[in-house]
Amino acid sequence: MAIFKEEALKKAIKTGDKNVFILFGDDGYLKKLYIEKISKPVADSDDIFNYQRFEADSSLQEVYDAVQQFPMMKDKKVVILRDFDYAACDAEDYKKLISLIGDVPETTVFILWFDALLIELKKNAKFDKIVKACDSARGMAVNLTHRAGHELEKMLNDGALKRGCQMEKGAARLLIENAGDDINTLHNELEKLCAYANGEVITREMVEKVSVKTVESDIYALANKIMKCELEAAFSILDDLFFMRVDPIIILSTISSVYVDMYRLLAGRSKNISGNKIIDDFEYGNRSFLIDNAALNLRRFDFNKLQLSLKALADADVALKSFSGEDRVVLEKLIIKLSYIAVKGESVD
């Protein structure tokens, strides 16, 4: 049973030697992008004879009939089945689906597209059988997940050049940190930045000024201000987070993750384990920049400071979960404690 990645799919589309595809994964943009890349060379979506799309509630017999029908005045046709719930269907329909995948004629390109329906790969015997049927049909099942950080940076840099702009070093990465890794959002933010830059170099300052920021990026900024002991700025960000009604537990959890990243990196260094190995072992994926940030933050920390900081974070967690009704006070005290530890290397009550 073979599960392929995006690069393998790109090659298969170029060679054109596959006509059965299973597309799944957590990146909706990429799935839609490759639906178009696979189908467009065969038939346009407005071709009512050679482009047929079926939804989850469709009859599998209708889908099978469409797959088996010859194309009209073309060499091939496209049939797409979206979000068919193979796990919830009855045994007869599941059997039909397996049979359908294994019996696609060369004149049809069949795409089984899992859009809103997310696939759990671990211990999923039914999906495994679907993939095996695809393998037997010389097709390919492709897991389209969010692109890695460096791939997103390249996408943004290339996209800026196509729009007549250029991004200075670090600007693309900052945009990802601010706006997140959703490709649709990044495309929209890039369009906005290029219009603002008007042919000039897109600087980090422009990204900070123009791009949207996720709540998570605001909390990372709060953690950064805490470590630098910039209390006025830290409390200002906390004000904004409470104004946006962000759950205090989420604020604490995200701040804690910054310190956990540093602890992992420091512990790894003590055993001569590289940052890349930590990124792989803890599955940071396209969020590998968090370990890079941890390396920068560690310039201000040693093991003692980290240990004291993690203790303060754990105490705050207990206080928040005690439902005392003083969430704001708990977080304000935490900011002061963490800043004091970062500067003095000592705890404060």
Image (cartoon, rainbow, N blue to C red):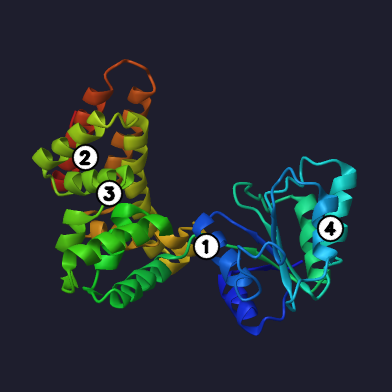
User: Which residue is under mark 2?
Assistant: 338
Label 4 to label 1: alpha-carbon separation: 26 Å
Could you tell me which secondary element the residue under label 3 belongs to? loop
Could you tell me which secondary element the residue under label 1 belongs to? helix
Residue 137 locus on image (x, y percent): 82, 71
267 displayed left or right of 213: right
Could you tell me which secondary element the residue under label 2 belongs to? helix
Which of the 4 image quarters holds residue 231? Answer: top left
Three-letter code for the amino acid on which mark 3 is drawn: Lys
User: Which residue is under mark 1?
Assistant: 30
Neighbour class for label 4 at 10 Å: few (<14), some, many (≥20)?
some
In the drawing, what numbered circle is on residue 64?
Answer: 4
Three-letter code for the amino acid on which mark 4 is drawn: Tyr
Label 2 to label 3: alpha-carbon separation: 24 Å
Three-letter code for the amino acid on which mark 2 is drawn: Leu
User: Which residue is under mark 3?
Assistant: 213
Q: Nearer the viewer, residue 201 or 77?
A: 77
Neighbour class for label 1 at 10 Å: few (<14), some, many (≥20)?
many
Q: Nearer the viewer, residue 349 or 317?
A: 317
Residue 345, visible in the rendered structure: no
Q: Nearer the viewer, mark 1 or mark 3?
A: 1
Sequence-first disc among 1 and 2: 1
172 displayed left or right of 103: left
> Residue at horizontal 76%, vertical 62%?
131
Three-letter code for the amino acid on which mark 1 is drawn: Leu
Sequence-first disc among 4 and 2: 4
